[in-house]
């Protein structure tokens, strides 16, 4: 499955389903992710917050 931006409802629904997911970074967020601390925060908030997805 592919989603084009983080969506908490979708990510929560996919927990423990075994469905593989590819998630894009929205264009509006790309430039800010050149800063390593901002990139880590984005991953923390949008990836790590949803274990087993």
Image (cartoon, rainbow, N blue to C red):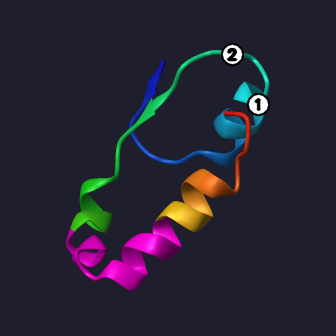
Instruction: Identify which residue is drawn at 70% across, 56% down.
Output: 49
Quadrant (top left/top right/bottom left/bottom right) for the C terminus: top right
Q: Dividing the picture into quarters, in which one does residue 52 lie?
A: top right
Residue 11's quadrant in the figure?
Answer: top right
Q: Nearer the viewer, residue 31 or 49?
A: 49
Task: Reply above or below: 8 against 48.
Answer: above
The residue to which callout 2 is attached is 18
Q: Residue at x 76, y 29 (%)?
A: 13
Going by the image, does 9 lie left or right of 31? right
Q: Is residue 7 above or below residue 22?
A: below
Within 10 angstroms of label 1, few (less than 14), some, or many (20 or more) residues? few
Find residue 26 and report its horizontal and vertical position in percent.
Answer: 33, 53
Looking at the image, residue 27 lies above or below residue 31: above
Q: Is residue 43 magenta?
A: no
The residue under label 1 is 15
Tell me the element at label 1: loop
Q: Position of residue 9 (x, y in %)?
A: 71, 40
- State if disc 1 and disc 2 touch (CB < 8 Å): no
Q: Which residues are magenta?
A: 31-42
In the picture, measured across the screen, residue 4 lies left or right of residue 50, that is left
Instruction: Tell me which corner region of the image, top left, top right, bottom left or bottom right, holds residue 44.
Output: bottom right
Observer-nearest residue: 38 or 8? 38
* Left or right: residue 30 compared with residue 20: left
Measured as percent of width and height from the top left, residue 27 is found at: 24, 56
Residue visible at 20% across and 72% down in the picture: 31
* Mark sitting on residue 3: none
Q: Secondary structure at mark 2?
A: loop
Tell me the distance, in whole angstroms, between the alpha carbons under discs 2 and 1: 8 Å
User: Within 10 angstroms of label 2, few (less than 14), some, or many (20 or more) residues?
Assistant: few
Relative to residue 12, is residue 4 drawn left or right?
A: left
What secondary structure do most residues of the magenta stretch adopt?
A: helix
């Amino acid at each position: 499955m592919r989603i084009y931006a983080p969506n908490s409802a979708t990510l929560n629904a996919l927990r423990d389903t075994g469905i593989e997911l590819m998630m894009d970074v929205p264009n509006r967020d790309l430039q800010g992710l050149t800063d390593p601390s901002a990139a880590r925060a984005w991953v923390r908030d949008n990836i790590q917050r949803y274990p087993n997805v």
